[in-house]
Amino acid sequence: MAGPSRDKSLYRDRDIVPIKRALVSVSDKTDLLVLAAALADAGVEIVSTGSTAATIREAGYDVTDVAAVTGVAEMLDGRVKTLHPSIHGGLLADLRLEDHERQLAELGISPFELVVVNLYPFVETVQSGATGDEVVEQIDIGGPAMVRASAKNHANVAIVVSPESYPAIIESIQSGGTTLTQRRELAARAFAHTSSYDTAVAAWFAEGTLNEGGEELPEHLTIKAERLATLRYGENSHQRGAIYTRVGGHGIAQAVQLQGKEMSYNNYVDADAALRAAFDMILPAVAIVKHANPCGIATTAPNALDPIASAHLRAHECDPVSAYGGVIATNGTVTLKMAENLKDIFTEVIVAPSFEPAALEVFKAKKNLRLLQLPDDWQQERMDVRLVSGGLLLQDADRFPDDIQSVAKDWQLVTGEQPDEAEMENMIFAWKACRAVKSNAIVLAKGNATVGIGMGQVNRVDSCRLAVERAGDRAAGSVAASDAFFPFADGPQVLLDAGISTIIQPGGSVRDDEVIAAAKAAGVTMFFTGERHFFH
């Protein structure tokens, strides 16, 4: 149903609105007293709530409590304090209309010309690890109502939702009032603020439903993101590009750049792919990525003096040619030794949870090298979202169990001998590494390091050939992992001819018996995992 309409001739012009009365209620008290001082100096009546009122009063400025305006004390542990006609009448009255002015006078309600409100720290509370009722209590009700009411009535009221807007508002207070253009811009920011807030709340409830094992994915999905930076261009130089941060995100978009040139669109894509590879591993690990595909993944060598440096060298050895100009991700601190090993290797980006100060000193000589430090609370997302034309796809994130033993607990030995502990560890490494490679994916590994990778081919045989070609002599005795089943024995035969010792694959083909027979004839061990790890 449409809202009320009025004769436009009834409206009076109100471009400049002097500020006589302000409603101030903020959870973020940054520069609050700077604003309060400007309001007090201009003789503006300040109406406030709870801790905001206490802070202003303790600083020596006059303040009127909301309860004194409404005639009703705050109730229900502060859940209800501003939801009252004496407040919202003063926010929503359109003083361009004589009838609204008359009604306020009859009711004894004074209007507000300035509202300064920011909302309860819902997102910060979620990010702190809080759950349940603690999070629910940070869902603001009165705040959004005041923000939206004031923004709707921007013809008469200036709404401020961030301390960043204080300097401009203070200037307006001192110069005689706010302009309509200014109030409209503030209203746009205010509606964006409440929209982002509501999206974060909706996302938290939806995620909670998913985590409880609900069978249905959310019927409605709202994704709110804010532009972090405009990039020089997109995937190609003729395309525009930008990076946005999603509310509640903990990944590459939240990383802090410590040095180097501006990140490009492709840098971000590759850095995210490198994270996917390195952070699957439990031992210190390094992944080197080029064009969103790994050209080397490795964990540390046994008893290495510097585990991360060791992992990097072993990953680099897989394909030194492709590693040129690559993106590196580690799941541990980048050490001085690793930095020294990278002195003569052209690298675009290094992503890590942290960097040793001595390593940062070494990297200063490589001014174009981009260093990204992940946030402390980095974690893999629980859901994967991918945009498609006209919509998006949503799925559970493809993740491995946190403990290495659980990865292989349901594997089925279909031919050959049961491997020893070291061999089993290498097999699990290969299986995890395979998940980070674009389908069709084949990974050859020795001693928890890739020696050959075949990726992105339109048939599995070509991926096998590519992996074997890149491995060369190193293919002999290696473990081969395939992200999906072999539909024929021709793919495995390429691997068998190269001398691999073990094959790990999901199984499930109508020709499994044919594939098993080929492995058995070659004296090769084969496991069926019962699950695949496509990565398109």
Image: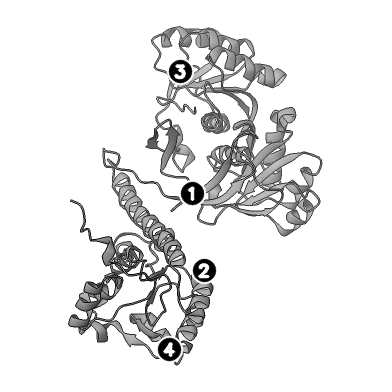
- Front of the two marks 2 and 1: 2
Residue type indicated by callout 2: Glu
Q: Are marks 1 and 3 in contact (CB under 8 Å)?
A: no
Residue 43, disc: 4
Query: Seen in the image, is 236 located left or right of residue 253?
Result: right
According to the picture, the residue beneath numbered tag 3 turns out to be: 485
Q: Are marks 3 and 4 in contact (CB under 8 Å)?
A: no
- Front of the two marks 1 and 3: 1
Q: Give the structural element (helix, strand or loop) at label 1.
A: loop
Q: Earlier in the sequence, mark 2 or mark 4?
A: 4
Mark 4: give few (<14), some (14-19) or many (20+) Cα within 10 Å.
few
Residue type indicated by callout 4: Gly
Q: CA distance from mark 2 to mark 4?
A: 23 Å
Between 393 and 371, the one lying in front of the other is: 393
Q: Earlier in the sequence, mark 2 or mark 1?
A: 2
- Front of the two marks 3 and 4: 4
Q: Earlier in the sequence, mark 1 or mark 3?
A: 1
Residue 9, percent from left and from top: 28, 64
Q: Earlier in the sequence, mark 3 or mark 4?
A: 4
Colour scheme of this structure image? one colour
According to the picture, the residue beneath numbered tag 2 turns out to be: 164
According to the picture, the residue beneath numbered tag 1 turns out to be: 379
Between 475 and 175, the one lying in front of the other is: 175
Q: Are marks 2 and 1 in contact (CB under 8 Å)?
A: no
